[in-house]
Amino acid sequence: MGALMRGHDWASTPLGPMDDWPQELRFTVGLMLRSRQAMFIGWGPDVTFLYNDAYLDILGARHPQALGRPMREVWPDAWPVAGDFVRRVYDGEPLRHEDLRVPLERNGATEDCYFTFSYTPITDEAGRVGGFLCIVAETTSAVERARAEEEIRLANERLRALFRQAPGFMYVWRGPDHVYEMANDAYFDLIGRRDIIGKPAREALPEIVGQGFFELADQVYATGEPFVGEGMPARIARRPGAPLEERFVTFVFQPIRDDQGRVMGMFVQGSDVTGMKRTEEALRESQQRLHIAQDAGGVGTFELRVDGMLAVSPQFCRLWGIEERPLVRLEELVALIHPDDRANLNTLRPGQVPTDGVGYVEYRIRRPDSGAERWIARRAQAMAGEKDGEARILGACYDITDRKCAEDALRALNATLEQRVAERTADRDRMWRLSTDIMLVARFDGTITAVNPAWTTLLGWEEAELQDVAFLDFVHPDDLAATVAEAGRLECGLTTLRFENRYRHKDGSYRWISWTAVPDDRFIHAVGRDVTARKESEAALRRAEDQLRQAQKMEAVGQLTGGVAHDFNNLLQALSSCLTMIGRRSAEPKLAPLLEAGMQAVDRGAKLVQQLMGFARRDSLRPEPIDVRDRVLGMAGLLERALRADIRLETRFAPGLHPIEADPTQFELALINMAVNARDAMPEGGTLSIAAENRTLGPGDASGLDGAGLEGEFLRLTVADTGTGMTPEVAAKAFDPFFTTKEVGKGSGLGLAQVYGLARQAGGTVWIESRPGEGTRIVLLLRATAGVPRVPAVAADAARPFIAGARVLMVEDDPVVASSVAAALEESGWTVLRAGSADEALPLLAGDERIDLLFSDVVMPGRLSGIDLSREAAVLRPGLPVVLTTGYSEEVARTEGIAVLSKPYRIDTLLQTLHEALRKIPSLPRGEG
């Protein structure tokens, strides 16, 4: 094309002599002529047409007259589509289209052709568009191949559906016990939709045992000889619990053999012929016609009688395109047969029924309903009537048009074998050009001799940049040794299958490539597929497995922690009660400081247990809707006191924050724990920021987090500091209970464990983002709730009267706690009835003894918990006040209208709670206290 363009009379075209062409046009023409990709240029107002050698296959007979002519004259048939593209690219818009259908005139006819192309504006230094460059590739064969593959896929799906929906039953037995391996819908309908797959036949259908079927199956399995059963009776339950029903089945037991010829199972196919058996006498003659039709392989049956009438089946009428009726005159059918084929039939004369020479014949008909010409095959035989001996012809006919067309096509294919070989060669060339997998040919020293265009698409390298370059120069340094070793195996004549390494992209990044390569005498021929996405998925799976192991570890530690904390709560309660009793019974002034110190130790222990419970998610929580913004701002003063003067507190809240549902005390405790950790991480001062915003998680959004699978509306709460940060090893253990990096005595290691427990209780998750020297961000995802946060009520300060002589039933399984608390209550004027479990308390509640209030632990031995006992009390003694106490149970969070006292509690708090529970009972005596 270069020589042709230099010799062209450009002075007679709108472009003028080549020496006068603009610099941008000459540069683009040079680029186009050097390329092996099909390209053309449109220039100037007339869109003068220029093209390269690779474009000649697309131009065809239009070359060389197309050179220098306006594009609308070169492609008049494609101009209705291309004209709009030209207008848009002259407006400065770059375009790209894939597999665009363009009707073209080829070989004297209009054909639908498909192209992938891009239009790129060519601008001068001032930015004006003078023309455009089009890079084009014809994809007609690829589009047609994709359509053909889709048709094949649909055909396979139809075949699978036909097997599943086949009217006859089919199933497969495996092994000598005849274990069910598969079955179709018709068989499940027959046996009443039972669960049989994987079960031995005698276990799956016990009612069939002794009816002979399994014995026949054993014989077929032992001898390898198939068995065919015709109309055999079987008594079977068609649905669970139904009486046995007699059915008739026709079936075949066909042995399945392995490669050594041994019987390994059985294929069973058959039909439920009960209806046929019961109507056998009435349908004998029809069965005779059906049998002939089946023998002939046809779909329409007929009977030609001496009177010139044909008794026909409905399918026969549909086959010939005539109105469905039982009798048809012979003359009507003769008129539909092609005149050239009538001589082949000896059954066309009314009143004459030949006794021989009928057999098989093929002929054409013209259907009266559609006018279509169809090929018909007829197979028949003459028979004498059973009663009168009168001759008649019974037969079947079926449509063979498709077979005839296939035969014609086969003859045409054989006649064009050479053409098809050439087309197949062209297909291989197109595969090289159009494949999305990268392909290369290289010498055994690694020098590249050829690459396909996919290298540019996948790795950004042009063919010229790769020619005569060693492919090892593009391999990742960590993969170089393995790649050299694999090249050595290829040089020894071995084939490479699924060898994976990383190749450098032109932008400096690397892509994982899986190679298949084969050597010949001189070269390596290799195909590589991009598996970067699979490699990244495998890495993500490994991360998810690590997160799952961490979650399982935290859950196990939480279970252990919850059990220890429960027992510790009872010890603290007993100690608190004993200290209170000592204080009440002794007036010694020197004991007061010691008792107060003891009570402070109990309170510190209670706080430690509360943190343990929060992590273990066993705390007796009272979750309620919380406005996070109001809650944090309300704690601002407390947070500032927890920090130092050199630490600035910042808050940022997005508008319209969702409320969350959590225990308010646990939420505030978690915030204090995070603030204290941040303070300790900023010894030289800094900034603590608390931010909140709404987040919506869709499927997969939380796949990289602990708690993968979270979906819906969440509130994201972030607590960030500018402190020393954490190493990855410390961050991985930060939520473990008792893990701390602080000095001995300066931290319990439970602060972040409690934060973790709060996040899980609130239906979300928590994670840490931190690096040494860059501060720490603790991020909580807390599930949003539709509930409305409660407005804090104003506390009433009115003194409540003491209720003297009240009788309380105390249910407590710990004897130390029970004795110390009972003593404190009795000293305060209460009458105490004691029970060690809910089972012991029930008879007291059911009796006549006076009981004014029930005070019960929640977690106790026996079949009933404290909550269960409160429900029984509501039935046995309606209106009886109930107060529950616990430091462990999650179930207490679901109670409504029942006072709950958290262990360990002070005796004064217990007395106040019991008094409040009895306030609404007017009949009790009251005193001052």
Image (cartoon, rainbow, N blue to C red):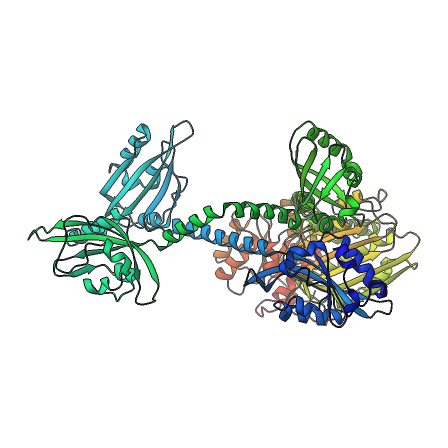
Q: Is residue 599 visible?
A: no
- Horizontal relation, residue 276 to residue 460: left or right: left
Instruction: Between residue 553 and residue 585, name the one nearer to us.
Output: 553
Query: How many marks overall?
Result: 0
Q: Residue at x 21, y 59 (%)?
A: 312
> In the rendered image, which quarter contains the N terminus?
bottom right
Instruction: Between residue 143 and residue 562, name the one nearer to us.
Output: 143
* 864 to 630, vertically: above or below: above
Q: Residue at x 92, y 60 (%)?
A: 645
Residue 372 percent coordinates (x, y) = 35, 63
- Horizontal relation, residue 463 to residue 644: left or right: left
> In the rendered image, which quarter contains the C terminus?
bottom right
Quadrant of residue 800 in the image? bottom right
Instruction: Between residue 296 and residue 221, name the one nearer to us.
Output: 296
Residue 138 percent coordinates (x, y) = 63, 57
Instruction: Between residue 32 and residue 891, name the one nearer to us.
Output: 32
Q: Is residue 374 visible?
A: yes
Quadrant of residue 692 in the image? bottom right
Residue 456 percent coordinates (x, y) = 73, 50
Residue 487 percent coordinates (x, y) = 72, 32
- Horizontal relation, residue 160 to residue 24: left or right: left
* 843 to 492, vertically: above or below: below
